[in-house]
Structure formats: structure tokens, C-alpha cells
Amino acid sequence: MEAQALTDGESRDMGGIAEQEALEQDFAESEQADVDSLRESLDTVKKQDASLSNVSPRIYILGTGSIGKLVAHSLRGIANPPPITLLLHRYDLLQAWEESRKEITIQDGDFKVRQGGCDVELLPEVRRQHGVVLKAGKRDVYAAAGERMLPHEAAMILRQETRADPQQQPVENMQDQPGTLNEDDEAQVQQPAPLEDAYYTPGAGNSTYVHSTEPIQNLIVTTKAAYTVPALLRIRNRISPSTTICFLQNGMGVIDDVNKQLFESEDQRPSYMQGIITHGVNVPPEVAKRDPFFAVHAGHGTIALGVMPRKPRISDGAEKDTNSSEIWSPSARYLLRTLTRSPVLCAVGFSPTELLQQQLEKVAVNSVLNPLTSLLDARNGALQYNHALTRTLRLLLAETSLVIRSLPELQAIPNINTRFSARRLESLVKSVAEKTQDNISSMLADVRAGRRTEIEYINGYIVRRDGDWEGDADAEGGQGGCADGEAVMEEQGVHVAACSVMWQIADVRVL
């Protein structure tokens, strides 16, 4: 009896243990199900932390000016830094790099910080005339035009025939019939062309890093806006739809030019990211000749980043569903994540709508500050406490405010009329002029150095958007907002072409 009672007791104990284990297992499964459900609900976070094993970690920087050196130096200074490649546009820069310590030096106050570990590549040169890229060894556009056609007309025909059939050879008789090409004066155009056929690098030697054909997935462009298209043309054959290009430049409208001249087909376009940089970086002229990889970080600021939306793209092997297509490409997520890791750059991501508004604010300020200081050959503080300049400033801002507030992409955003009112834009200009009163604008620095300015992408952008607005109103068969805008401008005494006149005068000032 005692043995049986003991056996019954052990059975009950074992049954209790089994029941407890079953409950613990059910609890664990329920907890895991809750965790999985939470992860599914946080779909954006899950995508942001997704594995990027198919993205190359190497980041290419196009433009070795002050901003390019600061970005390269800062990225190499973070923990587990990505490999950085500087794309050099001149052979003397390559020689200077090879003869130096192969380091970028940034001076911050009294401290000089050197950072190495960067690779370099020499960009190939491209034969380009009137927007047409020609193969090496072929006659140029001027020879092809002959005596009865202007060069730009011949270039237009070449571009049209290239779009129709990139492999087609122009064989028409140009001399006898205007608008055609002579067989003897043919010029073959391909875009992108084979690297060994279309590019040449005089004096570059046979080094392994000179003629690189490695695809570029992560590219940061810090060149002047006016030189963006020619610079990207030199690496066009290395850019694919999986590439992400980050533009850290002044002005607006660069992406429109890049799409128009380099990536006409929407399916072949890379992803775009834009940034607004407020860091103050300069290169002393006396040091630039001695060390072209030196810069002074004069003022700490921030970088506002935003990935431009694109149409979802389906990979060849993926089914057409919402999970397989992404608005952000993997390289865009990687590049944004890497830039925001740097404490020196202090980069922050914004939505495309918010970034657009910040860009328009900066363009509005620069459209007044840059050309006026360039025309006066004065520092930014010269715009303060000057009655004549204040009147000109207000005329420019009144027109700029009206154009910005009339943009169709801003109509659904609340508080636009207040944010971009002429009075608020004037306060922004005066605030910047006061904070930087001892500095010279970037446009004035370009004018003094004899370089091409970025006014085409500052005042020129405002003029073009005003033209688009008027064209849309005329196309609709009515005066619409254009008539209302002109009435408002007439009441305020605003010259309709104020920005246009400033654009043209400042452009002539450069010449």
C-alpha cells in the first residue's frame, strides 16, 4: 500500500511538472507571437534595420573642395568607417596626393586633425561640345557643321539621331541640305560610351586606380552646381539604377538638369538624395597651393538630408507585390544611415516636403545676399543699415515670396503664406547678414577667383519657376493665379522681372 501511495504521489508530481512546462511553453509561444506581431506593425523600422549585405560599403566623393574634404574627413573619423574614394578631376591633384602623406587635414580652431585611409581615382576626360559627347579620334561638331550650318544646329541633329538609334551613323549630306550630316563629317555619339573608346587621360600613366570601371552605388557630389553635369558625365558608365547620388550643393534645379542631360529614361535613373549644409568651411589660398587637401572648419553647422521619392521598382525575380518594391533603395538607406552617424557633420534626415521648404528658404536668402554682395564687392554686413539696399532687397523678396507661395507642390501644406511671406524672408536675410557680417558670400568668392557662379541655380531657379507658373496659367486658357499675382505685385510696386534682372546683371559681373 505504501509503495502504491508513493507511486501515485510521484505520478501527481510528474503530472504537475508536465503541466507547468506546458504552461511555460504556451506563455513563451504567446510572448514570441506578440513580439512578431509588434515587429510586423513596425514595418518602417524593420525596413530601416534590414540587412544591406547587397550594398557596397564604399562611398565615392565627387568634388574635392572644402565641403568634399570635410565630408571625407568626418566619415573616416567615425567608428567602423566606410571605405572612401576621392574622385579627382585633375592630374596635378593626383600627383599632389601621391607625393604627400595621403591624408586630409581639417583645422578646427587651433587644432589640426589629420585623417588618412582614403583611396583616390583620377576621373577620365570627356570630349564634349554643345552638349554632345564625341568618340575619341572623330572630328568635332564644328568640323561636322561645315559652312552652311551653325555648330549648335549640328549638335542638335546629333543628339536627335542618338536618341533615335545610338548605334546609327549619320550619313546624310549636310552641305547640300540644311539640317543633315555629311558622311565624311560624321561623328559618332554614344552615352554612355565604352570607357576605353570614349575617354582619355593624358599623362595619367597606367596606374590601377586611374581607369576604374567598378560600379558606383554610393556617390556624394559636392561640386559647384554649374559643374555637376560635366562631372557626372565622366562617370556616367559606372552609375546604374541601384546607385544613390547625394547632392550637397547650393541652389535648386540640379536634378532636373541631370535627368535631362544624363538620365532621360526614368527606368535608368539612380536614386537621389539632397542635402542642405550650414557648415562653414574654407580653404586659405596660400595653403591651397601647398596642400590641396587642407581645409579650415570655421563654423560648425548641420546637414539636412532628404531622400527624393521615386516610383517603386520591381526586381526581375520578384513578384509584383507591395512588399518586394521599396520607395527607398538599399543604397539610399545605407548612405543616409552612414552620414547621420558622424557627430561632426551633425546630419539629420527630413521628409521630402520639409526638405523642400528648407531649400526654398535658403534659396530665397541666397538670391538676395549672394548677388548683391557680388555686385558691391562687399562683405555680408554691407547689407545692414543701408536704405537703398533695403529697398532693392524688399523688391527682390516680394517677387520671390510670390513665386514660392504659388508653387503647386506647396499648395496642400498649411501655413505656407506665413512661412514664405516677404516680411519673414526679409527677417531671415537680415539675420544671416548679421551673423555672417564679416564673411564674404560664396558667390563673391567665385567672382573674385574668376570662377563660374551658381546664380543660374539660385536666382535662375526662381525665374524658371515663375515662367513655369505663367506657362501653366496660359495653357489653362485663363489668367488664373498669374493675373492675381501680377495685381498684387503692381499694388506693392514690385518689378516683375526683379530676380531676372539681378540674375543677368550678376552673370555679366562675372564676365
Image (tube, rainbow, N blue to C red):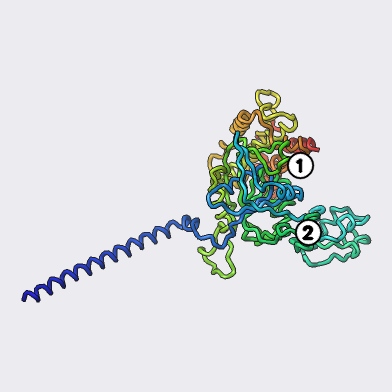
Secondary element at image label 2 = strand
* Nearest the eye: 337 or 213: 213
Q: Does the CB distance between marks 1 and 2 fall below 8 Å?
A: no
Check disc 2 and report the residue beneath it.
199
Image coordinates for residue 7, horizontal then vertical, percent: 12, 74
List the single residue furthest toward the left: 1
- The residue located at (58%, 55%) in the rendering is 332
Residue type marked 1: Arg
Residue 199 occupies quadrant: bottom right
* Residue beneath the point at 15% across and 71% down: 10
Q: Measured from the top left, where is residue 437 in percent x and y? A: 65, 28
User: Which label sits on residue 425?
Assistant: none
Lower position in the chain sequence, tag 1 or tag 2? 2
In this view of the protein, can residue 155 be seen by the observer? Answer: yes
CA–CA distance between discs 1 and 2? 25 Å
Q: Quadrant of the N terminus?
A: bottom left
The residue that mark 1 highlights is 452
From the viewer's perspective, is 263 left or right of 23? right
Q: Pointer 2: residues within 10 angstroms few (<14), some, or many (20+)?
A: many
What residue type is disc 2 on? Tyr
Residue situated in front as seen by the camera: 464 or 199: 199
- Tell me what residue is drawn at x 62 percent, y 58 percent: 217
Quadrant where the image shows the C terminus: top right
From the viewer's perspective, is 117 left or right of 449?
left
**Residue drawn at 87 percent across, 61 percent down:** 180
Tell me if residue 402 can be seen: no
